[in-house]
Amino acid sequence: MTESSTTKLLNGDACHRTSNGKNHASKNGYVKNHRLFQQSQKYHRLGEKKQNGNTNSSLYKKPYVEFFEETPLLVAVLTYMGYGILTLFGYLRDFLRHWNIEKCHVARERDEQKDFVPLYQDFENFYTRNLYMRIRDNWNRPICSVPGAKMDLVERVTHNYNWTFEHTGKVVKDVINMGSYNYLGFAENTGACYDAAVEATNTYGGGVGSTRCEIGNLDIHEDLEQLVARFLGVDSAMAFGMGFATNSMNIPALTGKGCLILSDELNHASLVLGARLSGSTIRVFKHNNMQSLEKLLRDAIVHGQPRTHRPWKKILIVVEGIYSMEGSIVRLPEVIALKKRYKAYLYLDEAHSIGALGPNGKGVVDYFGLDPKDVDIMMGTFTKSFGAAGGYIGGKKELIDYLRCNSHSAVYATSMSPPVAQQIITSMKIIMGEDGTTLGADRLRQLSENTKYFRRKLCEMGFIIYGNGDSPVVPLMLYMPAKIGAFGREMVKRNIGTVVVGFPATPIIESRARFCVSAAHTREMLDTALEAISEVGDLLQLKYSRQEQNRPSMGWMSEESLLQH
């Protein structure tokens, strides 16, 4: 990849050297003394324990509110002790397995292969053998219905401590689904989307059997891409059959050797893989911390590439709209201001935010009221809010034309299934109001109301909740390893389906349950789930929060008011 071929695809000049002695004014705020975000935060969240850097409130049209309460010291100590005890018992069990005192279910190399280079690294799977297996029954549960607001679970049992499972033939009916990314409730087997998908199946069949550049380019794919571009407010867009590959296969087409990628430390694995495959230099900044990002940008411009100190061919900032484990929303106005100030490029992954944020459901750009053209590469997936599969990239026409010829995901991957494409088209038109109804607007409003209600109730109960107040991803902190499995099992007993997450997907002392709020949830469903969560929280002693419960509804107080407290 040459510098000129991809540079002119994005936002013009790729030079990253600043003019000596000159300050620049950006569209979103005045830059002073070569530092964008020096002013201290004027407003604070009452009782907030941790901040990811200061906020430049002048760039925001609405309050930016996020919670990241510190882990209580005693809980942190007990969590480390819990992992320590589990590790000691793990080594003991490995010793017993080695001497055949305990039956070993682990895959191992045969004795005849002991002189070969090992295919299976035993130590790397210590955590899987001795910790994950104890609570493995909380994951990979098979369901046998539409994953809507309620779902049916296939009952299973284990007779060897979660190494294998057997289905009993029974079905657990009407489990309230608090784990699926069904933000707008389009995962359904009735209604306009279902009818349109069935009609598309009858017309085109279930699959294409070819790539887009051969004979797999259908008119429905062209219609989808034109609609996506119009929905996003960009010149052009391209659809892909897999969301993960949209990131991992397109980032290598945009950057290469001599380029610098600045990645948020909590970016999704697909973004991390794409960055590594590109061969670019990768530097990580603290999550949502603009001071950390700006420092990396300044250092990159001042020092250039290692050893040669030549200017970087391209600097690409990679962030997400909603971070799926933290429930936080990217500080996009500040990122765009930095991007403009230092003439970098911006890659925005809206997998969780597209359809779930903003007054028109157009994602985090719509949420902050920004211009879509300020984002060079807009990426998102259809697997969440649209109830389908695949992903997209939107931007300038030159960018999309380039990707059609150079992206591995575009050239080698089979085309998107026609009924899936039709599901996306129908749901997107509903969101845009082009179906002639207010169903899309009603669902957007219902999702926002459900999110605020659910988060507020959990905070009032005394749980530690992470993330932004408008994020439908709601992490509830569990911390201790034994409580991960216990919480998931107790919730299923009460007919509530949840997702529990632990190390290494999260920091070792920040295990959590992650709820995903949907517009399909009724207030009765949420109240039932909240009652069960509170009951399990009392049972497992999960109500760790030390914040005052009677705080102002807006949550913003001036410095003078805080001094009086």
Image (cartoon, grey):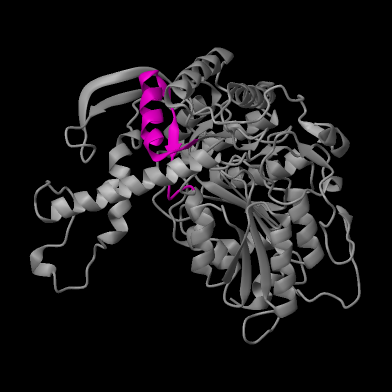
Tally of numbered discs: 0
Report x, y in % for residue 135. Answer: 32, 37
Report x, y in % for residue 75. Answer: 49, 38
Question: Considering the image in quadrants, where does the C terminus appear?
Answer: top right
Q: Residue at x 69, y 84 (%)?
A: 310
Report x, y in % for residue 281. Answer: 58, 72
Residue 254 visible in the current orientation: yes
Q: Within the magenta stretch, is there residue 505?
A: yes
Q: Is residue 105 left or right of residue 548?
A: left
The residue most toward the bottom is: 308
Question: Considering the image in quadrants, where does the N terminus appear?
Answer: bottom right
Q: Nearer the viewer, residue 62 or 443?
A: 62
Residue 66 quadrant? top right
Q: Residue at x 54, y 64 (%)?
A: 275
Report x, y in % for residue 476. Answer: 53, 33
Residue 134, placed above or below residue 266: above
Q: Nearer the viewer, residue 232 or 221?
A: 232
Q: Is residue 323 left or right of residue 130?
A: right
The residue most toward the top is: 524
Q: Residue at x 25, y 28 (%)?
A: 156
Residue 387, placed above or below residue 175: below
Residue 389 visible in the current orientation: no
Q: Is residue 56 left or right of residue 144?
A: right
Q: Is residue 312 left or right of residue 562?
A: left
Instruction: Point out the stretch of residues depicted in magenta.
Output: 478-506
Q: Within the magenta stretch, is there residue 527?
A: no
Q: Nearer the viewer, residue 549 or 269?
A: 549
Q: Residue at x 57, y 61 (%)?
A: 404
